[in-house]
Image (cartoon, rainbow, N blue to C red):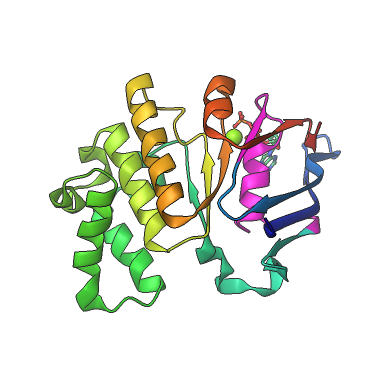
Amino acid sequence: MSALLEVRNLIRTFSEKSGEALAAVNGVSFTLSRGETLGIVGESGCGNSTLARLICRLLEPSSGSVYLDGRDMAELRPACMRLQMVFQSPAGSFDPRRTVGSAVHEALANRGVPKSGRAGKTAALFERCGLDAELAARYPHELSGGQCQRAAIARALAAEPDILICDEATSALDVTVQKQIIELLSALKAERNLSVIFICHNLALVQSFCDRVLVMHGGEIV
Ligand SMILES: Nc1ncnc2c1ncn2[C@@H]1O[C@H](COP(=O)(O)OP(=O)(O)OP(=O)(O)O)[C@@H](O)[C@H]1O
Ligand SMILES: [Mg+2]
């Protein structure tokens, strides 16, 4: 398997109140192959979320690079569509003033899907994620946590990503719903040959779901 994503010596520092610099991510390198599921574990504050945000370029690195298909992400602006994130707080990742369906429409529009095709595609994505298509008309607070996370996955898929980065995407859900979401992710992964970066504190879950696991400590892979 050739590397789809290569993370090379990523560093991100934040300045603390004391004036000292904290390296939240300190020289992280790894590769991810197409179709691979990579787990990242580590104690709270070890830099997991910072690393996820750096990879998606929601945050600029202090130094280091991320390559997608061998091309530097810093020079590939629309490349971010190819990496999509699913966050811990299902409702918190949606705009509370807009329906969840409109968030999916927006992702489709960003991918160039014409207006006339968006409703049908949204319905299909909702149904693929185990949601009744009518739920697209609801606001985030009108959905359960599990339903909202399914809608967040539908929104991520609307971008037709190659890589899904799940940052504690199942942590806020109860165990039964957690299992359902993992099953959904496993099925989608196989069906679309998706690569997944799965950040999670639950080691048993990571071991059962991932092909390979990286352990982070103090901003480094140990
Ligand atoms: N924008 C920021 N400004 C300053 N410090 C930050 C910022 N973002 C993160 N940090 C610091 O970087 C370190 C790593 O944060 P990060 O959110 O990556 O942790 P994490 O590993 O995801 O933890 P958790 O498992 O609890 O979610 C922490 O010490 C945090 O306080
Ligand atoms: Mg985090």
Question: Residue 90, position in %: x, y?
Answer: 38, 39
Question: Residue 107, position in %: x, y?
Answer: 37, 64
Question: Residue 217, position in %: x, y?
Answer: 77, 29
Residue drawn 32% across the image and 43% down it: 150
Residue 53 lies in the magenta stretch = yes
Residue 75 lies in the magenta stretch = no
- Position of the C terminus, as image quadrant, is top right
- The magenta segment: 38-64
Q: Is residue 221 above or below residue 61?
A: above
Residue drawn 16% across the image and 46% down it: 132
Q: Is residue 163 visible?
A: yes
Residue drawn 44% across the image and 48% down it: 190
- Position of the N terminus, as image quadrant, is bottom right
Q: Which quarter of the rendered image does ligand 1 occupy?
A: top right
Q: Is residue 65 left or right of residue 124?
A: right
Question: Residue 27, position in %: x, y?
Answer: 84, 46
Q: Nearer the viewer, residue 105 or 62?
A: 105
Q: Examine the image and state in which quarter residue 25 appears.
A: top right
Q: Nearer the viewer, residue 106 or 7?
A: 7
Q: Examine the image and state in which quarter residue 26 appears.
A: top right
Residue pushed farthest left? Answer: 134
